[in-house]
Image (cartoon, rainbow, N blue to C red):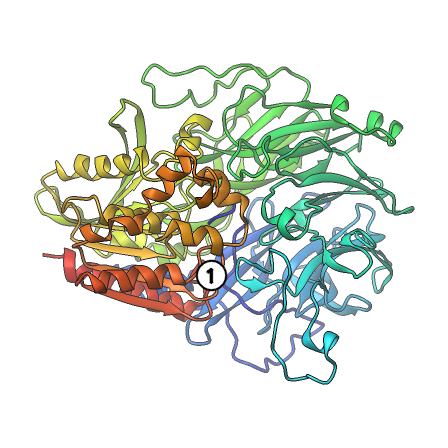
Amino acid sequence: MKKQFLPLMLLASAMCACSGNQQAEPTEPMITKTEIQVENGQFTPEIMHRLGKVGDVQVSPDHSKILYGVTYTSIEQNKGNRELYLMNVDGSNNVKITNTPKSESNARWLNDSQIIYMRSGKLYTATIEGSTLKNEKEVTGAEGMESFELSPAGDKIMFIKSVKAAQKPTDIYPDLAKSSGRTYTDLMYRHWDHFVEEVPHTYVASFNGTQVSYVTDILAGDTANPETEDKKFELPTLPFGGLEQLAWSPDGKYIAYSCRKLAGRDYAFSTNTDIYLYNVETGATQNLTAGMMGYDTDPLFSPDGTQLAFVSMERDGYEADKRRLFVIDMNKALANLDAKDFRGYMKELTTDYKYNVESITWAPKGDKIYFNSCVNALTALFSVDVNKKVGLPIEDNEGTGYLPASYGDGIHRITSSEALYDFDGVSIIPNEIGEVASLITTNKCMMRPAEIVKVDPATGDFQELTFENKETLDKLDTPLMEQRWMTTVDGKKMHTWILYPPHFDKTKKYPAILMCLGGPQGTISQGFSTRWNYRLMAQQGYIVILPNRRGTTAFGQPWCEQISKDYMGLNMQDYLLAVDNMKKEPYVGKVAATGASYGGFSVYYLAGIHQNRFSALIAHAGIFNQEHMYMMTEEMWFPTFDNGGAPWDGTPQTNRHYGNSAHKLIKNWNTPILVTHGEMDYRVPVDQGMAAFNAARMMGVEAKLLLFPEENHWILKPQNSVHWNREFFAWLDKYCKE
């Protein structure tokens, strides 16, 4: 189902764009910022997609300017386009510096007055003169790049490019040029939404500002089958890995990277990625985290290169283990590169911290690391003192979590729990003596997409620097939002977000939507998504119930891990309790249950046990038959861990889990259900949705099946998304609005 590190997926299907001395005449219709029409304050799927999506924030080397991108979507053209913007670090003089029909991506500073960026798989440089982009030049030798990162000195470049990983029919039978046959002898022949015919590799090369040369594949000869060159390793790791898995040393002599050097069946059953150190001059490679068995990822050198930070999970075969923060003493590591085990040169900074570490950034002096962490359903900014012992957090008196800023010596919460936003990533603005003066980051919430903000590291106060969507949002009626802590059947506290329609009136009755979270691990926090948009649901007149049930990751590992091997247990009671709790309110009318992935499984399972609590059901990409799902998904570690093993293991645990699959309860189904699925979904294959729909109709239950042939686990293309939302609300309105 989902990946925890999952990075944000863009709707834009085109890659890149930019300007020269004069902007070229568009050869196709421009997709750019336009005035969005709002009628009667109503938020619609069309408006949702047309909002600008801010991202990839880059602070200039002199810390005076911010370069960033905004993606605009055309529903008519069914794609997006990304423009580049520039502003001062205080938010002033904000200007658009590109205006072409092709998206710019991966924009970086070459120096204080030059930038480098990608467009349509090509690399370009340009000069910033005032608020204008001038002198665009294409970099030669860079064709086919997918993303890149310059060395600190700017004289080298590492970039990601796909390489062939499987034989085609003509490789075996040259005379069969039109054959489309695929032949496999091992697992992992398909992944997420594609058959594995190519994998990403990372290359390092010289760069002189106009040309890329002397290109070397970091993984050259490093493959599970060097004789035939098949079963190539991935760098970065699919399906969502990117540049965050690679890091330059400050002197440009080394690249640290995260890689799972496994293939086939071994790859399918493991999550064990390690941090490797690559010598740019010699090509020598050393595994720095051998013996650490879970995900080791996100390496990042300290500014002086003496330390290497990374994030690590402890256990192999589990994607929702706690993301711990480690630091390696690189002076000791480099002095002992022939060592078999480097764990004696590292320390963990979050031993007693019970939450996950994301998006790490070093302070200029190397004395602190800034990071994001989701705590009690809010992703906040934190810092940890590299040189201080981490102490135990202090539990609050109400049992609803942990005190916002009391995480022991070394860890400090910067943004307040009163700020109902998710913060994502951080860049640092230092003062004259190298201390942290301010933090540049983005934040978002259920009410709006991400905007760039400046945070005071001492107080946590923040100033919004961009207002990309303010003009449109100001025209919309705004839903109300609250947080509740509900007492579960076993006496624990469950956090729940509640959204109410605009102009909510307690004297009236409203239909409600129970949102079943996917994952199964993850958290419903203050994000803004074009896939499942809670504001959109509330603005169609629904009360939206968003429980952070057992299995969510922002409330400590015991709460997170309870769901594994117990899909049909306490978390289902959490959902029923949330509904029962809300139905006590006189303003709650008919209720529907909705969800995707594991949330889709939840809907299928609730269909058999809800005892008429729900008037309608909607399941997207859900697991219906767990036995069949086990043999049809691609990353086998996932169902093996969460189900307790394979269906044929015959243990009490597996017998209970598979014996209580959702499809076993079909005889109890009596509620109208909409089933949706992408046909390119290889995580939860489409036959799961087809089987659920078929079974419903066999039982005489009202049902509808909506399939998208070109979509994966998510519905991403703009017109498909609008189509999906129209069907979603039409189904709910039919059965839930009185």
> Residue 417 or 669: which is nearer the viewer?
669
Q: Tell me the residue at 53%/57% (across/down).
A: 192
> Residue 122 falls in which quadrant of the image?
bottom right
Residue 311 spot, x, y in % from top left: 63, 34
Q: In which quarter of the image is residue 657?
A: top left
Position in image of residue 366 (x %, y %): 72, 28
Residue position for label 1? 681
Q: In this rendering, would 232 be left or right of 86?
A: right
Seen from the viewer's position, the closer of residues 402 and 111 is 402
Left or right, 406 with respect to 312, comes to: left
- Of residues 36 and 306, the one nearer the viewer is 306
Residue 26 visible from this viewpoint: yes
Taking the spot 60% from the left edge, 55% from the top edge, the residue there is 187
Left or right: 651 as drawn, with respect to 635: left
- The quarter in which the C terminus is drawn is bottom left
Asked if 657 appears above or below 466 in the picture, the reply is: above
Left or right: 200 as drawn, with respect to 693: right
Q: What residue type is labelled 1?
A: Asp
Q: Is residue 44 visible?
A: no
**Above or below, comparing residue 22 to residue 473 in the picture:** below
Q: Position of residue 365 (x, y in %)?
A: 73, 28
Judged from the image, the secondary structure of the residue bearing numbered disc 1 is: loop
Which one is nearer the viewer's eye here, 449 or 375? 375
Residue visible at 61% across and 43% down?
270
Circle 1 packing at 10 Å, graded few (<14), some (14-19), many (20+), is: many
Q: Residue at x 33, y 61 (%)?
A: 691
In the rendered image, residue 351, in percent from the top left (x then y), is placed at: 58, 21
Quarter where residue 229 is shown:
bottom right
